[in-house]
Amino acid sequence: MRTATNKFVSVTYDLNVGEGEERELMERATAEVPLRFIFGTGMMLPAFENALKGLEAGSTFDFTITPADGYGEFNEEHVMELPKNIFEVEGKFDSDMVKEGNTVPMMDADGNRLNGSVLEVKEDVVIMDFNHPLAGETLHFTGEVIDVHDPTAEEIAAMSSGGCNCGSEEDDCSNGCGGCGHH
């Protein structure tokens, strides 16, 4: 069976970013914890699926996704200073959650959920980056298709409930599933 629309696909991969000798391993899906998704249902980046289209179990892959086909270019306009008081809980600044390096779930004025990375906490403002963590990065995937089959009712239910199963414990889909090809 080959990867095609509505097939349940499991893959292992290494995701490296950067160029040449400067490549850095960002994410890995192993045989024990593979990336699982239903092909052609909008769960993955189109460029990721296009590179896997027609492969069968046992096929290996090695491809690159440019920022234009991945998570876009880094946009300085997505780095913002927000008033510190919006991060107060019961009148007190939430310094446990809002600290440099943390990712904070937020909502825009239209009610859309998004994650922001805290770059710096200043006296009156918090500098947040709302770019995708892999914006501006060229993504290099190498791996293997380990299974392709018609999805079971349980697998369809698990995927439609928002479970991404990206292969990393900290990736609960709230960040768009990082570099594993998810939106």
Image (spheres, helix red, strand yellow):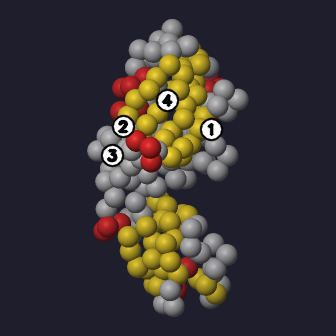
Residue 79 picture location, percent across and down: 38, 70
Residue pointed to by mark 1: 167
What label does residue 16 carry, if any?
none
What label does residue 67 carry, if any?
3
Q: CA distance from mark 3 to mark 2?
A: 7 Å
Query: Which residue is farthest right?
Result: 32
Label 2 environment density (alpha carbons within 10 Å; few <14, some 14–19, many ≥20): some
Residue 110 picture location, percent across and down: 38, 64
Residue pointed to by mark 2: 65
Q: Is residue 180 above or below residue 114?
A: above
Q: Residue at x 58, y 67 (%)?
A: 102
Q: Is residue 64 above or below residue 107?
A: above
Q: Secondary structure at mark 3?
A: loop
Query: Which residue is farthest top?
Result: 1
N-term mark: 1 or 4: 4
Q: Is residue 113 above or below residue 21?
A: below
In the image, 51 versus 88, the foreground residue is 51
Confirm or deny contact between disc 3 and disc 1 (CB under 8 A): no
N-term mark: 3 or 4: 3
Label 4 environment density (alpha carbons within 10 Å; few <14, some 14–19, many ≥20): some
Q: CA distance from mark 3 to mark 1?
A: 22 Å
Residue pointed to by mark 4: 142
In the image, 161 versus 117, the foreground residue is 117
Q: Residue at x 45, y 72 (%)?
A: 128
- Rendered image quadrant of residue 103: bottom right
Q: CA distance from mark 4 to mark 2?
A: 11 Å
What kind of residue is marked 3? Answer: Pro
Residue 73 picture location, percent across and down: 31, 54
